[in-house]
Image (cartoon, rainbow, N blue to C red):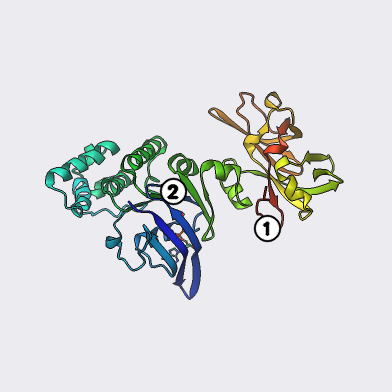
Amino acid sequence: MASVTMENVNKYYYSSARLNHAVINLNMEIQDGELVSIVGPSGCGKTSTMRMIAGLEGVTQGKIFFDGNPINHLSPAQRNVALSFESYALYQHMTVKENIQFCLKVKNLSPQEMEKQCNWIVGLLGIHNILDQKPANLSGGQQQLVSLARALSRTPSVTLLDEPISHLDGRARQDVSIKIREIHNQLGLTMIYVTHNQEEAFALADRVAVMNFGELQQIGTRQEIIENPVNMFVAEFIGEPSMNFIPCQVSRQGETLELICHKDPAFHLPAARKYLPALHKGQYQRIIIGIRPIACRLEEFRRPDDCKLTGQVLSYEHLGEKSFVKIHALEQKISADISSHYFYSTGDTLSLYVNPQEAIYFDEETGNALPW
Ligand SMILES: Nc1ncnc2c1ncn2[C@@H]1O[C@H](COP(=O)(O)OP(=O)(O)OP(=O)(O)O)[C@@H](O)[C@H]1O
């Protein structure tokens, strides 16, 4: 297995006389044996990044290294990467078993070893019943499992999985993603995993990379990204429901700092301790306060320092153990994740309690998180 380093990597596409800067100055380091997941909105450059690492797409500018060795000039085969992309790319004239074994042939295994390796991955992914089928007779989900089996049966330098289980339904998807993690752990693979599903990304990966408009916004563990998003894009994109953003004016009176979020009715928040040094510098007049829905509590769960926010219920959803409510307060929508067994109707008056210490502050001008 190998570490992957991307140094100032750029990808331009020239199509219909239009220049598209799909990946912009990407710098990323993936350790040997690490599982990194890439998430981001459609068109942000995830697949282009994967295809450049695989060698299926040229790098316009910048360098990619495996274990410190430049690989830009190497063909896909020379890079020794295993791939499973959303479109399965199976050999249509071969059976499932032949598809898997074909990939193992490059490893020069004996027939017995090949059989053993094939049985291992087939057993893990539970696809024995389709071994003699041709791809055309399989569902989209089954074809993805075969494509995944092919990628995971090898022990390549780097394993690239791009939406490898997007066609599986809920339960099967969860089971297979757990198996991918198990295989990764067992074999110590260096793996890059693209998904639109944040929960899957955080459940699987050691670190998650968030991209937007071709640029890497942040790479970190779940805790780092949830607790310390670097900007409003990451804060809003990660987490469901999305973070609430409340614009505030910073009011300084001597040593006292207060955030005026709304005048009538008045809603003031004491400044969070961790941001006091940044706010005292006087550079920020207006900031945006980010409050996660999970940090908006009902009265029964309120904490001593919580501030009260009252408004009319706009919507209420009860989903199994979770309940989401939106209220109209401070002339905007405020979402709360209230694990509650009460039911609310549109128009009910509801108070939510937020702890000012749990808020994340952003510069109104740049959208970047304030330092602390
Ligand atoms: N072969 C191509 N020719 C021209 N433009 C392309 C090509 N492939 C991708 N693009 C453009 O590059 C940008 C990044 O595309 P890419 O497929 O890498 O994004 P993505 O994050 O993987 O999207 P999705 O999540 O929808 O798969 C998009 O604007 C896309 O339209």
The Cα–Cα distance between marks 2 and 1, rounded to whole angstroms, is 28 Å
Q: Which residue is farthest left?
A: 111
Query: What residue is rendered at 79% in x and 53% in y?
Result: 282
Picture layout, residue 222 above or below residue 85: above
Q: Is 25 positioned to the left or the right of 102 in the image? A: right
Q: Is 298 positioned to the left or the right of 85 in the image? A: right
Q: Secondary structure at mark 1?
A: loop
Q: Disc 2 vs disc 1: Cβ atoms closer than 8 Å?
A: no
* Residue 19 position within the rendered picture, expressed as x and y whole percent measured from the top left: 50, 72
Is residue 84 visible to us here?
no
Of the numbered discs 2 and 1, the one sitting upstream in the chain is 2
* Residue 370 position within the rendered picture, expressed as x and y whole percent measured from the top left: 68, 50
Q: Residues within 10 Å of mark 2 (few under 14, many from 20)?
A: many
Is residue 225 visible to us here?
yes
Q: Quadrant of ligand 1?
A: bottom left
* Residue 30 position within the rendered picture, expressed as x and y whole percent measured from the top left: 43, 52
Q: Is mark 2 within 8 Å of ligand 1?
A: no
Picture layout, residue 203 above or below residue 32: above
Q: Which quarter of the figure has residue 81?
A: bottom left
Which disc is residue 36 wearing?
A: 2
Q: Secondary structure at mark 2?
A: strand
* Residue 117 position within the rendered picture, expressed as x and y whole percent measured from the top left: 21, 42
Tag 2: amino acid: Val
Which disc is residue 366 wearing?
A: 1
Query: What residue is rendered at 85% in x and 42% in y?
Result: 264
Q: Is mark 1 within 8 Å of ligand 1?
A: no
Q: Residues within 10 Å of mark 1 (few under 14, many from 20)?
A: few
